[in-house]
Image (cartoon, rainbow, N blue to C red):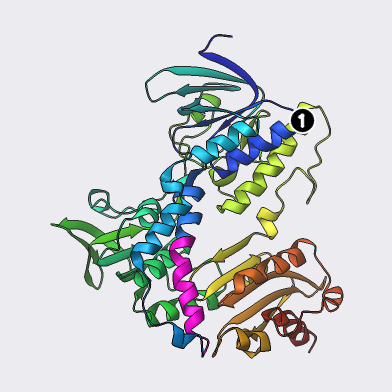
Amino acid sequence: MSEAERTYDVVVVGAGSTGENVADIVVRGGLSAVLVEPELVGGECSYWACMPSKTLLRGTEVLAEARSVDGAAQAVTGEQDVAATLARRDEFTHHWDDSSQVEWVHGAGIDLLRGAGRLDGERTVVVTAEDGTTTRLTARHAVAVCTGSSPATPPVDGLADVAAWGPREATSAKEAPARLLVLGGGYVGCEMATAWQALGSQVTVLQRGDRLLPRLEPQAGDAVAESLRKAGVDVRLGTEVRAARREGTEVVLTTADGEVRGDEVLVAIGRAARTADIGVETVGLEPGEYLSVDATLRVEGRSWLYGVGDVNGRSQLTHMGKYQARQAGAAIVARAREEQVATDAWSPFVATADDVATPSVVFTSPQVASVGRTAAEAAEAGLPHRVVEYPIGSIAGASVFADGYEGTAIAVVDTQREVLLGVTFIGPGVAELLHAATIAVVGEVPIARLWHAVPAYPTISEIWLRLLETYRG
């Protein structure tokens, strides 16, 4: 074997959290694996998404909680230290240095090859290093494409010429812009509007649709919009941006209602598959498209190729990418051993939760924590269901948590099987309620059995009892 040619059991293209987990699972299963990565090992989540965004938001959240408790509120005599918040963000990203993650990779028995990986026919990946040298990798069993996704760009005239921020720039900025325009009202748009408004920017959110967080229950988007407006954010719904330009240091966006001016514009309208330049055409696939996969994350029609994480478009969340990685890794190992791979729902090799039990948290103020189907999704699927709501602020534990606590819990119940299809919590501190809901949805725990899951008093978890009482009438 020459330096320019190497063979492994599994070649993983992309060393973000998804790729790391695929490689870890297959190596634990006795296979050899190499990670291919042109940027930082750890990917978006570690350096430009989950970790930096949540650390930017955490100080604002803590201050809001303290100010909502009489006695503690009097102790809060100053404002958030923006420089310290940004420095803490930098600590969590290790100052955009991946040395510790590289150390983990090597310690896990995984090889790492720096460079851009491109498919070059069946089971083959060619890696081009920064200095132009190439290495041809051959996979005995599988190639896993874990290249993730990139920010989508809307077809707005002139937008490509204004040096717009994407999520990376929004989470790594060294100072708060005086005026920040946010194009899009999804997870990223709402979180970054919350963060930068609190850190000193005047933020304007421009959402094309009629509500924020359109994939969640309507009450979630309404609550976040109200909270953002109370914080001073200019939230404009039903607003289509038609053109963009720079005038000196200003960004100018043209809408049907006139012009909006800012110092920076964040484009946060969604994601696009990162498959445009990774050689998928050499195996008969369309560049730029999401990889269509089966339940085991194997690309349809290719027995050796897997598309795991954002790149398949199924559920673009870090924790779901890791989940898919565990399932795909188990399937790769089993197939390498010529063992049976069960593809029925909830088997050790399939990503069933993608379809019916995806949990998510929007770290706005209030938080929005949800899992499973919304009421609209249950109706679309033709499932017999009933929606139950209860004000979280009526719970004793919530009133202890914060004076004047406001929030809503929503449960979507399958009335035929008497199990939960989905649950949404809206309010301060509700993220930590979510995993109980996830267990109930994944386990299809009957309402009759949930009745015996007694919540401790006085905690916000007592909302479970009130939801069940409301359902039973």
Circle 1 residues within 10 Å: few <14, some 14–19, many ≥20: some
Q: Is residue 319 magenta?
A: no
Mark 1 is on which residue type?
Arg
Residue 230: x and y, percent?
Answer: 39, 82
Q: What quarter of the picture does the C terminus occupy?
A: bottom right
For residue 57: magenta? Answer: yes
Identify the image quadrant of residue 189: bottom left
The overriding secondary structure of the stretch rendered in magenta is helix
Q: Where is residue 269 in the image (x, y as percent from the top left)?
A: 41, 58
Residue behind mark 1: 335
Which residue ends up furthest to the left in the rendered image? 248
Q: From the top left corner, tell me how far across and down residue 209 is, in percent.
A: 42, 69
* Image height of 177 relative to 397, above or below: above
Please name the residue shown 30% across and 63% down the image.
176
Towards the viewer: 54 or 326: 54
In magenta, the rendered stretch is 54-70
Q: Residue at 75% across / 61% down in the picture?
A: 442
The reply to whether residue 269 is visible in this rendering is no
- Give residue 385's position: percent from left, percent from top: 73, 74
